[in-house]
Image (tube, rainbow, N blue to C red):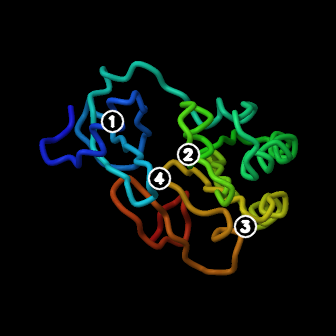
Amino acid sequence: MLPADAPAWVASALADGQPVVVRRALVAAGQVAVGVRGIRRDQRYGTCMPVAAVSRQVSPEALTHCTGQQDWPALQALYRLRGRLDDVGLAWGVSGSAGFELASGFAALHAGSDLDLILRTPTPLSRGAAREILGLLEPGVDMQLQTPDGAVALREWAGGSRKVLLKAADGARLVNDPWGVAA
């Protein structure tokens, strides 16, 4: 299903059995935007595939209580944060390299990897509540608030800027309200 101009490393990664990850992008009905991870950080390839071709799906929320095969600092932080994040009362999950490794078993973490998390926020989260949640996190932990219209960095929403960067399927833009998408 790869386009003819896909780099050779993409075909190699998929031939090794590596799964794809869902990404934000506008695609035709019946398609899902996916990405392939290479060995190096600069090796990321975006494409799309038919939804019907998906054979297994693992959500970030399904990874919150998984244990990794290695004892990386990012995973140690996850293990320490679980109880605190469970008490927030919103669905949360593991994304980024840690999520990829936990979901697939393919090595993606290293000693300097950050821990990337998501927090599902279907309704507005006040900036005060965002600051409280930010206070639960440790250095080296980043969290994205998943709104109905895209994602915004928790750290940014908890800050003092009037506008924040919303990453949406149709691109990134500065907004006043990530839940109301006012420009």
- Which of disc 2 and disc 1 is earlier in sequence? 1
**Residue 93 position in % (x across, y down):** 66, 41
Per the image, label 4 sits on a secondary structure element best described as loop
Q: Residues within 10 Å of mark 4 (few under 14, many from 20)?
A: some
| Separation of residues labelled 3 and 4 (CA atoms) | 18 Å
First along the sequence among labels 1 and 3: 1
Q: Determine the secondary structure under disc 3.
A: helix
Q: Could you tell me if the residues under marks 3 and 4 are in contact, i.e. CB atoms within 8 Å?
A: no
Residue bearing the label numbered 1:
32
Tell me which numbered mark, 4 or 2, is placed earlier along the sequence.
Answer: 2
Q: Amino acid at mark 4?
A: Asp
Task: Judge left or right: residue 47 versus residue 151.
Answer: left
The quadrant of the image that shows the C terminus is: bottom left
Q: Sequence order check: which comes first, mark 3 or mark 2?
A: 2
For the point 63% across and 52% down, which residue is it?
110
Comparing labels 1 and 3, the label whose residue is closer to the camera: 1
CA gap, disc 4 to disc 2? 28 Å
How far is the residue under mark 1 from the one under mark 2? 23 Å
Q: Which residue is under mark 4? A: 149
- Crowding near the residue tagged with mark 1, few <14, some 14–19, many ≥20 C-alpha atoms within 10 Å: many
Q: Are marks 1 and 2 in contact (CB under 8 Å)?
A: no
